Image (cartoon, helix red, strand yellow):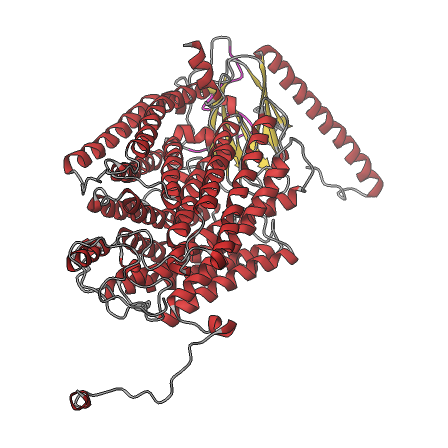
Amino acid sequence: MGHLASTLAFFTPQSGGSPDANQIDSLFKITLVIALVIFVLVEGALVYAMLKFRKRKGAVPAQIRGNTRLEVGWTVAAAVILLALAIVTFAKLSSIQNPPNSGPEGDKLAANGGGGGGLLYASATRKLPPDGKSLNIKVIGRQFIWQYVYPGASEPDGLGAPYSYEQLVVPTNTTVTLDVVAADVVHEWWVPQLGPKVQAVPGYHNYTWFKALKPGIFRGQCSFICGRGHARMIATVKAVPPAQFDQWLAYQKKQLSEANQLAKVERAKLNSQTGAGQVENP
Amino acid sequence: MATQLAAVPQVTAHAVQREARGWTSWITTTDHKRIGIMYMVTTFVFFCLGGVEALIMRLQLGAPDNTLVSPTVYNQLFTMHGTTMIFLFVVPMMAGLANYFVPLMIGARDMAFPRLNALSYWLLLAGGIVFYASLFWNPPEAGWTSYPPLSSSAFTPSGGQDAWIYLIHLTGISSILGAINFYATIANMRARGMSWGRLPLFIWAILTYSVLIIFAMPVIAAAVTMLLTDRHFGTHFFDPSSNGSPILWQNLFWFFGHPEVYIMILPGFGIVSEIMPVFARKPIFGYKAIAAATVAIAFLGFLTWAHHMFTTPIPEAVLVFVMLSSFLIAVPTGVKILNWIATLWRGTVEFKTPLLFCAGFIALFLIGGISGVFLAIFPIDWQVKETYFLVAHLHFVLVGGSVMTIFAAIYYWFPKITGRMLSEGLGKLSFWLMFVGILATFLIQHVIGLDGMPRRVYEYDNVGNLALYNQISTVGSFILGLGVLVTIINVARSVKIGVIAGPDPWKANTLEWFTSSPPPDNNFDTVPQIRSVEPMKDIRREVERRTSGAPASGAIVPAGATQVGV
């Protein structure tokens, strides 16, 4: 049995990072078992027919033109198998599409309505956990780098929020909802171990979620042709314990406000040298 | 006698024209057979070009972090490869086969509109030349799907993108004109007695292929026109910064693109449905079911395009609908596979090269069909879409599917076109190389995709076993290439020194074998009355009866058949 499982693992999607990836993996395995049975039966019938009925001396081909009962039978059988697959898919669907609540040890930053800073738009189709609380992060695809905007805007219009490039840092055991957008061309967010890929389409918002079950670094990359640098548009997700994440985010905010402060001072200096108003405040 | 003859009105020929020869006769021809040959030769040349592009890509991917080609060249290679194989090989190759064999199989002397037919070919060639001329400047690099905004002037300013647009237009018009011609020919020019229920299955397939082209091609023509005006004339159909929509392109493209899949495979299904019964010496199992399945697939093919868009922002109702409609299309496809296997059942199967390619087609296409079901289940699609899993799927369907059937057709019909047989030994060698090559190249690509490698990347990191898997795939692609080369050698040899075929070397079932090989200009002097779906069987039986039990061999020309050109 263990051997079968490892053979199947060779031929299944990556998983283990997030519950939705695990559910897709198990849906894939169920489909794979059904597919293998059909594959063996049909290929077996083909090879058997080729060898058993190959031309021999004195053999007379049977002049059969069809068999309605048989033909109706295998049409219905094919439909029944696909119906079964559809039922399995629907049974798994909610656990793949709908994010669960964050764990009790999850990050307390997870806010109601997926709100918080960094969110510029609202949409009806975003899926939220039953308690409505998630850590919402905006993912921006642009040639050829991913940008992540975290909650915690320092200004009312959502500006001044902490951000990072290429590597997304998240707390473990916390439901993270992603608001995926694109700045130039179409990109596609995909970190296999964390579940579904979603297109980042300019002018549209797309949504997905994951909940990192354990600390670690998960690799992924843009999977939709976006130009010459497509192959190097890497995305990694670093999952860290919530306390560490809070610390990291606070540090980012501090750096950002220090940099802003410094910029303000520099601007004031420049303005006093060149005459007020020449260099605009943001 | 003489006085009797004088009473009959006679046509007097004042100037007898010599049969046209030389290269000008090819340029000016309106003969469906010559046009068919030009189609087939031209598209095969493009097939070889597309194949070389594929092999360069496989070489690049043969090792991780390889630097054989630059990312720009790599993007150009996959764009050229995909576009070539679809628009300049599979679709027009099917048109070439149909050009040659539709009139012959239905007992017509030419296509309904011979000059339009010539125009179709020259538009195809023009499209190919426009597209390949971009090699000397800047080839297109946005993929055969050319998704905007990437393909817009802001992100791909080069003229190669425009060459791609004109290729779509020229080959599109070529296909539409050809399709109208096939439809008119099949609808109006069938032999006496050839009712719809006695139409050869290849003709059913071409009829459906034509209807699909007539409905699907104008959509892509509209889409690329919008892209062209976006690029050069200031419109904003796909420009999100002016409320245009990149999703609109995806809808239009795949509304064409999914039926296009069936445009490429249904004629192949028709070819297999013709060849299997001949070499099993048994009638096709379930003629009506296969014809009905062809039409059903074509209809359902228009309802499933959004399964190419499962990762876009899309309402859940659409996801569910499209998954179910995609499942539905698997039913008639599966039915066909079982019908073909049942055709072998209790027959006397002759392992000739055309049959091997058909059997190989069933074995490989089944894999593509099954992986298609995985892709139709949208949560699974969310993992495997745009990865090498998808690349593997589409190549099992297109190479294991369409290409195998095209090679079956080459081996089956070469004797009719040239009057000479292809070598069976080289044919079988070619088959096994291609069969093994396809399995080695594409089976492992499922795993490459599942391990996280997206498509259309010029390099990858050496994580896990990716390097090994990609090496296997690269080696396989060269085995496949070798297999194609063997057939090219086989054709080059046999054109000159192949065994003389005679009119009906396979003892086949359909009307093209009634005339000589190659057929004369007018195809048939007399066209027999059709009494069943297998007219040649009836004719052979009749000859046998009239010659009072003497065995009818392929060398005997049936009563009433023409001797011209033998």
The number of numbered discs placed on residues in the rendered structure image is 0
Residue B165 higher or lower than A252, as above or below:
below
Position of the N terminus of chain B, as image quadrant, is bottom left
In front here: B520 or B81?
B520
Q: Position of residue B168 (x, y in %)?
A: 48, 57
- What is the quadrant of residue A250 in the picture? top right
- Horizontal relation, residue A103 to residue B259: left or right: right
Q: Position of residue A42 (x, y in %)?
A: 31, 30
In front here: B336 or A269?
B336
Position of the C terminus of chain B, as image quadrant, is bottom left
Q: Position of residue B60 (x, y in %)?
A: 63, 38
Residue B521 higher or lower than A108, as above or below:
below
In front here: B446 or A195?
B446
In front here: A174 or B299?
B299
Residue B402 higher or lower than B415, as above or below:
above
- What is the quadrant of residue B401 in the picture? top left
Q: Which residues are magenta?
A: A106-123
Decide whether residue A13 is among the magenta residues: no
One can see residue B256 in this view? no
By secondary structure, the bulk of the magenta-drawn segment is best described as: loop
Give me the residue at 41% from left, 54% from top. B421
Residue at the far right in the pictured view: A273
Decide whether residue A107 is among the magenta residues: yes
Give me the residue at 27% from left, 51% from top. B201
Q: Position of residue B419 (x, y in %)?
A: 40, 60
One can see residue B206 in this view? yes
- Horizontal relation, residue A85 to residue A210: left or right: left
Give me the residue at 43% from left, 48% from top. B407
